[in-house]
Amino acid sequence: MITLTYYNNLIKKNDLLKIIKIYNLKNCSTLNKNDLLILINKHKACIIIQRIFRKKICEDQICPITLTKVSYPFICIKNYNTFRYYSLIDFVKYLNKSPDDFRDPISREPLLDNIIKYIESLIKYYNINKISNKKKWNKKIKKRNDYLNITKYLHEILDDLFSKKSVNFNYIYNTTLPQFIYYFHFLIKSHRSSCFMFITNYINCISHHSNDNKIYIIDYLKLLIKVNNL
């Protein structure tokens, strides 16, 4: 059982300010003694609650990567409306060793930008740069940014296609297909593992276009899958 010891009015304000500095609490110099006491006690209570919560997670949760109990520090990722807990060091090692870009181990979906930034902040905070293999990590970040840029341009082409109700053959032959050929070349060359699902989604999306000439684009995308053995 954990007992929480509260600070009280017997402590001088100057000593409270020193405690504030130890806890690294900001913007407290103008607070009166009573407010300082409330702030410090709330902060200490939060620390105790976090410790209990972390201990419970480590006791109850199994890391999907190692299939052992989650160790602290850990990271929590939500997929399929379920929160999954991973030991941070094992999660970073997994991402570094994986031949793919940054992907969720369970869903296989690309990790969102905010998750990547969160992981990077944890790596820095817990000083695990040696484990994270910074050089390899930066290379993957660069590759991921490259993937996002290519897909962004492809999405713009698709948006342009759907902005037109009538799409004639000349437009497809002279505008849409040349751009698709250019960007899909780089996508397949550098991000092959992501291509099948990406192209399949494009085929499904374009099939809903109202213009019959869409078939030329769909045929090209199907040919991409076949020729490249995706």
Image: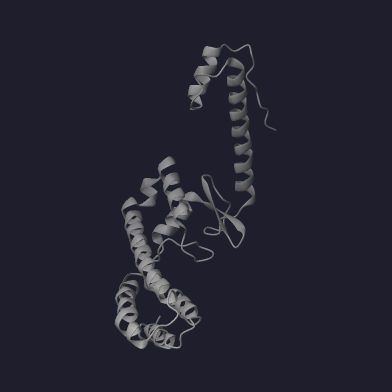
Number of numbered markers: 0
**Residue 18 x/y as whole percent:** 50, 18
Q: Is residue 106 left or right of residue 155?
A: right
The residue sitting at 60% across, 28% down in the picture is 44
Q: Indicate whether 121 appears above or below 202.
A: above
**Residue 38 x/y as whole percent:** 62, 23
**Residue 84 x/y as whole percent:** 58, 56
Q: Is residue 36 left or right of residue 120?
A: right
Q: Indicate whether 3 appears above or below 73.
A: above
How are the residues colored?
A: one colour
Judge by depth and name the residue closer to the eye, 12 or 61. Answer: 12
Q: Quadrant of the N terminus?
A: top right
Q: Indicate whether 196 appears above or below 138.
A: below
Judge by depth and name the residue closer to the eye, 142 or 34. Answer: 34
Q: Quadrant of residue 167?
A: bottom left
Q: Quadrant of residue 140?
A: bottom left
